[in-house]
Amino acid sequence: MELRTFRGGIHPPYRKETTAGKATVEISLPDEVVIPLQQHVGAPNNPVVAVGDKVEAGQKVGESDAFISAPVHTSVSGTVKAIEDRKNFTGASVKSVVISVDPNQPTKWTEKKNVDDATPEQIRDAAKEAGLVGLGGAAFPTFVKLSPPKDKPIDTVLINGCECEPYLTCDHRLMLERPDDLIAGLKLMMKAVGANKGVIGVEENKMDAADLLISKVCSEPSLDVVVLEVKYPEGAEKMLIDAVTGRRVPPGKLPSEVGVLVQNVQTAVALYDAVATGKPIVERVITVTGPGTKQPGNVLVKLGTPISHVIEQCGGLSGDVAKVVIGGPMTGWAQKDLSATVVKGTSGILALTSEVVDTNAEQKCVGCGKCIEACPMFLTPNYIVKYARRGQWDLADKFGARDCFECGCCSYVCPASIPHVGYVRKAKAEITAAEKK
C-alpha cells in the first residue's frame, strides 16, 4: 500500500509506545481551578460572574460579542474565589476566574438525543455555545470554521487523526475508545458546511485505530479513512490537505480556499457531545508522559486544573527532569514552574530529562540549508532568523514569518542549535505590534 504524504518534514523519534496502549482514565479534582478567559484565537472574553458567586459545572463564566471568539465555562461546581490576572502556559498574564471546588460534583450530560435531525444552524449554534475550539492546539473557534464564506464552498471535511507530535497519544486513544462518536462528529461537520465527503487521516503507526475506523465506515460511500506516512508534521493543516487531496492552500490563505475544512479528532468528538447532550468544553483528554514521569498515561482532565496536580496524579516527577513542556516537544511551551493550568488546547504534559533535551548553545548559522529542505511550507527559515536577529521585522515578514506555523522542523535539523521558532514568534509579535500602531 502506497502511503500518502507531503514534501519536506522530518522523522524524529516518536516515543509513543509508553502510552499508546494505555486506556484513558479520569483523574481526581484539584482544590481549585483557574479558568483563563481567553483560551482561543480571537477576542478575549469578559467575565459574566463575580467574586463570591456559586457556579455549577458547565456554567458560562466568560463571553464576548466578537464574531471570532469562544465563551468559556467552569469545569466544576464551586465558588468564585477571585477574578484576576494569572500566568497561562505561554507565560502571558490572562484575566482568569479562580474557583474553589465543591467536594460534591453533580452528574451532568448523561442523556443523549438523536443528532441526525440537527440542522446546520443548530450544529453551529451548539459549537458556539459550547465554546468549542480546535482541540489539537490551534484553538481557533470551531463555530467560525463551520461558517465559511458563501463564495468558498466546502466539499470535503478532513479529520486530523495523525497526531504526528512525538510522545502524544490522546487522539489515538480517542479513535480507539470513541470511534462512533468521532464519526458522528464528522458527519455533523459535513452537514454544517454542506460537504459531500468526509475523510479521516491516520498515520501508519496507528493501524489499530485506522483498521477500526475503516471497519466502521466501509459501507458509507461519503466517508473514507486514508492511511498516511509516519512523518512530522503530517497532521499540520496544510500538509494534511496536500497529502490527502493533492490540493495546496496558497500562502496566506485558509483551507476554505481549496474547499476543505480540517478539524482535530478530539474536536469532532466534542462537537458530537455538544449537539447530543449540550455539554460545553469543560474537560479534555491529554497525554502525560516523558522519561521524567513516574506513571505515564492518557488522562481525562477538567479544564483549569493546575499542571502540578495532573503530574501528582500520575505519580509525580522522576529522575533528572530538565524541562516540563505543555503540548508536544516540537510545538509546545517549556514551563518556568508548574502553576499554569490545563486549557482547551492542551494536548499533553511532558517531563523531559537532560538526556532528551538539547542543551547545546546557539551557534552561528553554517549555511547548510537543512532548515530549507525540512520546511514543509517552502520557506527559508535561515533568512527569517537573520532578519529577526537584526530587528528588521519588515524583511522577516517578506520572507514568510507569518506563513510559518511553528512546526519546529527547522530547529530540529539545525546543526547550530538555532531556535528558529523562537525567532519566528518574536518576529510575528513585532510585526503585529507595528501594524496596530
Image (cartoon, rainbow, N blue to C red):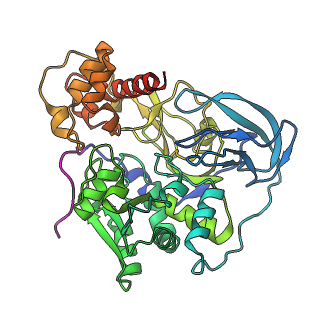
- The residues colored magenta run 1-11
- Rendered location of residue 133, percent (x, y): 54, 52
Residue 127 in sight: yes
- Please identify the quarter of the rendering in which residue 370 is found: top left
- How many numbered discs, if any? 0
Q: Nearer the viewer, residue 337 or 75?
A: 75
- Membership of 4 in magenta stretch: yes
Q: Nearer the viewer, residue 376 or 210?
A: 376
- Please identify the quarter of the rendering in which residue 310 is found: top right
- Please identify the quarter of the rendering in which residue 196 is found: bottom left
Image quadrant holding the N terminus, namely bottom left
Instruction: Label the magenta part by its dominant secondary structure.
Output: loop
Q: Nearer the viewer, residue 198 or 136?
A: 198
What residue occupies the far top of the structure in this picture? 390
What residue occupies the far front of the structure in this picture? 151
60 left or right of 203?
A: right
Residue 160 in sight: no
- Membership of 27 in magenta stretch: no
What residue occupies the far bottom of the structure in this picture? 219
The image shows residue 151, relative to residue 97, as above or below, that is below
- Rendered location of residue 52, percent (x, y): 88, 38
Residue at 42% from the left image edge and 34% from the top image edge:
352
- Rendered location of residue 172, percent (x, y): 42, 60
The image shows residue 408, relative to residue 434, as above or below, that is below
Residue at 71% from the left image edge and 47% from the top image edge:
29
Residue at 68% from the left image edge and 32% from the top image edge:
95
- Rendered location of residue 77, percent (x, y): 79, 50
